[in-house]
Amino acid sequence: MTARDASDRSRREARDYGADTTPDGPEDPIPQGLRTAAGWSWRVIVIGVLVYVVATVLAKISEVTIPVAVALLLTAALWPLANLLTRHRVPRGLASGLCLLVLVVVVGGIFTLVGAQIASQWPVLSEQSVASFKQVTQWLDKGPLHIGSDQINEYIAKVEAWAKGSQGRIASWAAAAGSGVGRFLAGLVMALFAMFFFIFQGSSISRSVSVLIPRGSRPRILEAATKGWVALVGYVRAAVVVAFVDGLGAGIGAAVIGSGVAVAIGALTFVLAFVPIAGALIAGVISVAVVLVTLGFVKAVIMLIIFVGVMELEGHVLQPFLLGKAVSIHPLAILLGIAVGSVLAGIVGALFAIPLVAFGVAFARAMAHVDDEEEEAEDEEDVDEEDADEGPGTPDEENAATP
């Protein structure tokens, strides 16, 4: 073993075992633990500043970043279908177009069916709503609250007066809502186009972006990113199944109790189920409120029980067996991810939090696995060098050692 090899081994041992001495000098006055903490601290600070800057820039151009993020989720959902078509000798461009057509037909069909059902049931819904309102007013008048019709009329008059005095504010709200709808439609078109090109040329796009990664770290980062993408595809696919089961259960339950908008309730539950925790809560509140207004208190309680049952099925059966197999994420990580996403970006943050966590966890595990393999390879090389250095001696040494 050369002097340089011995020096390198001493440095490695000092790093691994936290020694406070240097291999070629006197005792270091700064403890190794403090050096390690300082190294971690400035690296974490640099990463935090980088993340803050990137998040600020993305927030400034949210009208572009959000549609692109939605396009990535849609691509992950339709990626297995595109690969299936490609394996059956369908050209990739045609497969991408068919995936886009399937998405438009399915989503458009759901909303068309919901609109048609609401339009056909509108007279019945109006009559049921008026009857339910009369029952509520009678209960307020004769119930324990003793709120008479005069007080109710007074409250209604106050609401009408507020509406007449706030016409300008209401008009500004309507204009803002119209502008928001316009931005939503523009973002939807952008997301659909981006999804098409992600499915069609995703591999070439990823190769083009990979040139920004340093050449030495490129293979390991690309491999980890591939593992993250596989985890994201698995998560989105499992999330679609879970949302479909939630919507189906809610729709069947609403149909059993006689609701005329059972399809609308099922579709609303399906769409909102993609927002973890908050989506199911919002869907349940809206559905129970609709049933309360149209069918009365008793059936609203039944609808509430149905929703609780559906959520229990999701939490104890679907989530562990589907999402647990797709991506191994601890429930605490999911809860913290949703909380952080909601604080930073509201509903949008809650929607993208878990897919981002799924990708990040798979990416980090892949990188850690690569690091472990590299360390094992280095240890094996060190052992081989030691065996080579400790090989047979010179002939003179062997003869001297012979009795």
Image (cartoon, grey):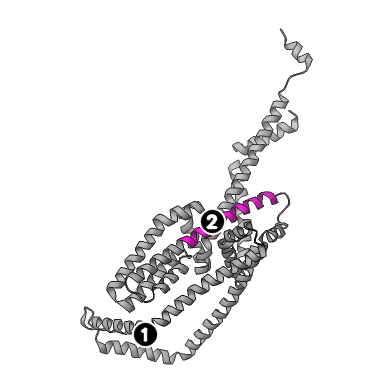
Q: Secondary structure under badge 2?
A: helix
Question: Which numbered mark, 1 or 2, is in the foreground of this view?
Answer: 1
Q: Is residue 335 magenta?
A: no
- Magenta stretch: dominant secondary structure: helix
Residue placed most toward the observer, 37 or 108: 108
Residue 370: name its quadrant: top right
Name the residue beneath numbered marker 1. Answer: 123
Residue 342 left/right relative to 198: left
What residue appears at the point 38 percent right and 90 percent down from the top-left corner? Answer: 160
The numbered mark at residue 234 is 2
Residue 327 image position (x, y, % from top left): 51, 53
Q: How far from the left and from the top, in percent, is residue 245?
A: 43, 62
What is the three-letter code of the residue carrying label 1?
Answer: Pro
Q: Where does the magenta region start and end?
A: 214-241
Taking the image as shown, residue 202 lies to the left or right of residue 162, namely right
Q: Amino acid at mark 2?
A: Gly
Percent across and percent down for residue 144 are 21, 78
